[in-house]
Amino acid sequence: MDTLTQLRSASPYLQRATTPIGRIEVTSDGEAVTSVAIERNGVLPHDGLAYDSNSVADEAVAQLLDYFCGYRKSFSVPLRHRGTPFQVSVWQRLAAIRWGEVTTYGAIASAVGKTGSGRAVGGAIASNPTPLLVGCHRVLSAQGRVTGWSWGEGAVTKAWLLDHESIGHS
């Protein structure tokens, strides 16, 4: 089974939109959002697939567009995350970080009971399937620095999101 067929069977619904940080795409299994991707170098992961949306994907895109306009500071669409228990615990912790708040990799490690495992937390954050909806951009180094990001154009996109939420960083 090729990659596009696998995606279609796992998340049969797809919606896209243009945002200030580039195009985004949202996938849904019909009941919950299963992924959010941000364009990187002009490409989205599923550019080869046609739009085939549903109400969940449409609502997620509408909420994300409201976020970019500054009208929305939290999201209410259902999410379905698949990952290891450690990854899921990190993503749940990320989901609790509100608009304009910031934390560190070390603080998340402590919060999920893995003190000293900041690098492992970074790995879990890098595999967050729903960036933006689960605010992984709100995590900085202990010194308040932007230390890369797996989505969009990396640290530049992360810095834009932090600025959008008036979060100080270096």
Image (spheres, rainbow, N blue to C red):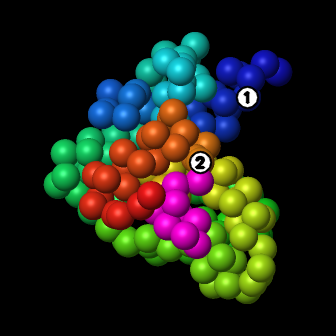
| Magenta segment main secondary structure | loop
Check the picture and name the quadrant holding the C terminus. Answer: bottom left
Q: Nearer the viewer, residue 114 or 155?
A: 155
Q: Give the residue at x 66% y 51%.
A: 126
Q: Give the residue at x 57% y 32%.
A: 12
Cα separation, mark 1 vs mark 2, equals 29 Å
Label ID, residue 133: none
Locate residue 65, reporting x and y percent.
26, 42
Q: Is residue 145 left or right of residue 121?
A: left
Q: Which residue is mark 2?
A: 148
Q: Is residue 126 left or right of residue 168?
A: right
Residue 36 shows in this picture:
no
**Which badge, 1 or 2, is on the more N-terminal residue?**
1
Q: Secondary structure at mark 2?
A: loop
Q: Which residue is mark 1?
A: 6
Locate residue 69, reporting x and y percent.
19, 45
Q: Secondary structure at mark 1?
A: helix
User: Is residue 110 shown above or below 145?
Assistant: below
Residues in magenta, as a range: 138-147
Residue 75 shows in this picture:
yes
Q: Is residue 156 magenta?
A: no
Check the picture and name the quadrant holding the N terminus. Answer: top right
User: Is residue 55 shown above or below 7?
Assistant: below
Question: Label 1: how many residues lie within 10 Å, few (<14), some (14-19) or many (20+)?
Answer: few
Q: Is residue 143 magenta?
A: yes
Q: Give the residue at x 38% y 72%.
A: 101
Question: Label 2: how many residues lie within 10 Å, few (<14), some (14-19) or many (20+)?
Answer: some
